[in-house]
Image: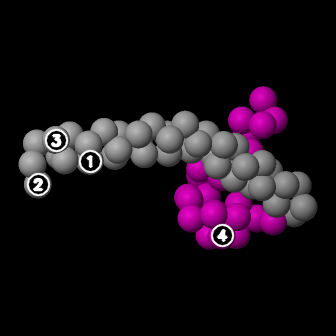
Amino acid sequence: MNTTTDETTQTNMLKLVRYAAKNAGVATNKRDAAIREAHNAGASLRDIAKESGISHMSVKRIIERSTN
């Protein structure tokens, strides 16, 4: 690869990172909404954690944030 190709690749990768970072908030908001809905439906913190791939303490914090 030459320098121009390397710079183009870096630029493209940085654009991808910027896009992913921008859209991560949307995905997180959707996940958190689903967690709150599951909790309201009676699912346990541990069951929600297992399905979402995060710790039960993180689930607890998400739920507590929505009630404060």
Q: Splitting the image into 4 quarters, where does residue 34 fall?
A: bottom right
Under circle 4, the secondary element is: helix
Whether residues under marks 1 and 2 lie with C-beta atoms below 8 angstroms apart, the answer is yes
Amino acid at pointer 2: Met
| Dominant SS in magenta | helix
Amino acid at pointer 4: Glu
Asked whether residue 62 is drawn in magenta, I would say yes
Q: Which part of the image, by quadrant, shows the C terminus?
A: top right
Query: Mark 1 highlights which residue?
Result: 9
**How many angstroms separate mark 1 from mark 2 (CA)?**
10 Å
- Residue 11: tell me if it is visible: yes
**How many angstroms separate mark 3 from mark 1 (CA)?**
9 Å
**How many angstroms separate mark 4 from mark 2 (CA)?**
43 Å
Q: Nearer the viewer, mark 4 or mark 1?
A: 1
Nearest the camera: 39 or 18? Answer: 18
**How many angstroms separate mark 3 from mark 2 (CA)?**
8 Å
